[in-house]
Amino acid sequence: MKFLHRIPKPPLSRFVRVLWFYEGYETAHKKERILPTGTIEVVFNLKEDITRVYDPRKNNECLTHRGALISGMLTEYTVIDTDEQMHVMGMHFAPGGAFPFFDLPLSEFKDQHLSLEDAWGPSANTLRERLLALPSVEAKFDLLEAALMEKMMAFEHHKAVLFALHEMHSRQAQSMAELVEKIGISSRRFIQLFSEQVGLTPKLFCRVLRFQEVVHGIGGKRDVDLADIALHCGYFDQAHFVHDFKAFSGISPTEYLASRTVHLNHVPLAD
């Protein structure tokens, strides 16, 4: 399997964590659960002009999208077809980082998979065609950076959102009430700003962050003490920990432990 990535140059690096490219991803299983990560992703399928997503909320109904796909902030797992990961590339936004590139509140993308054409118009399909025509991965990355620079709107996150993101990632905020008190605006206004510029409510975003802390705490370790990881991540009640994990992933922590792969947020599904 070929995997390459690039950290974009400033000012893009403020908003886009990484550009990535996969080729030759082959597995014995046909479908995978994709776990919520607290970020927004844009994916270009370079093998065929269609991407299939299976919605677990609708009895795994298959939804098809042409061109590039926007995966919004997820609050539960979704299912993808591994055949479509054979030749793909994309961009992984920082939390809140997608806001300058879309003329919509990011809350509109919550639990949604949409065609990039819906947001960028015909230029999205033109971009995919240009990516296909380029011979090297580095040239493809150059084109993605140029396209993002062209789409990026003049924008500054509200200082309340920036402060909250810093506190949440550093685990300084002990409760939403304490965070709102530090910020100094009304709770209602803060929730509105955060949802628009990040994609989830502050409370739900913190829950996804904590879930991801658990996933990475498990990582690839051979000997895993789930109770210890749960406690380290702020779960003081085992039942709450298991309930939260299952709400986001559809499986228990023990089941995840048995089925995890090196790709921590991709969990194989039995055929």
Image (cartoon, rainbow, N blue to C red):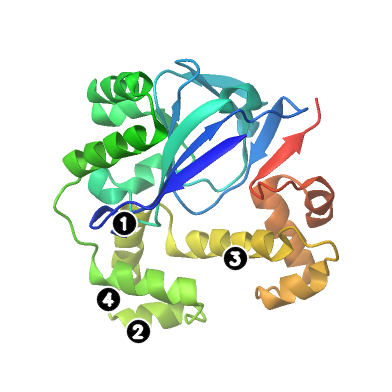
Q: Quick one: SS at disc 1?
A: helix
Q: How many marks?
A: 4
- Pick whichever of labels 3 and 4 is earlier in the sequence: 4
- Pick whichever of labels 1 and 4 is earlier in the sequence: 1
Q: Is residue 191 left or right of residue 175?
A: left
In the picture, which quadrant includes the N terminus?
top right
- Pick whichever of labels 3 and 1 is earlier in the sequence: 1
Circle 2: residue type:
Lys
Q: Is residue 22 above or below residue 97?
A: above
Q: Nearer the viewer, mark 3 or mark 4?
A: 3
| Label 2, residues with CA under 10 Å away: few <14, some 14-19, many ≥20 | few
Q: Where's residue 189, x and y in %?
A: 28, 66
The structure residue drawn at horizontal position 49% and vertical position 60%, both measured from the top left corner, is 205
Q: Nearer the viewer, residue 57 or 223?
A: 223
**Residue 185: which disc?**
4
Q: Which residue is mark 2?
A: 182
Q: Nearer the viewer, mark 4 or mark 2?
A: 2
Q: Nearer the viewer, mark 1 or mark 4?
A: 1
**Residue 210: which disc?**
3
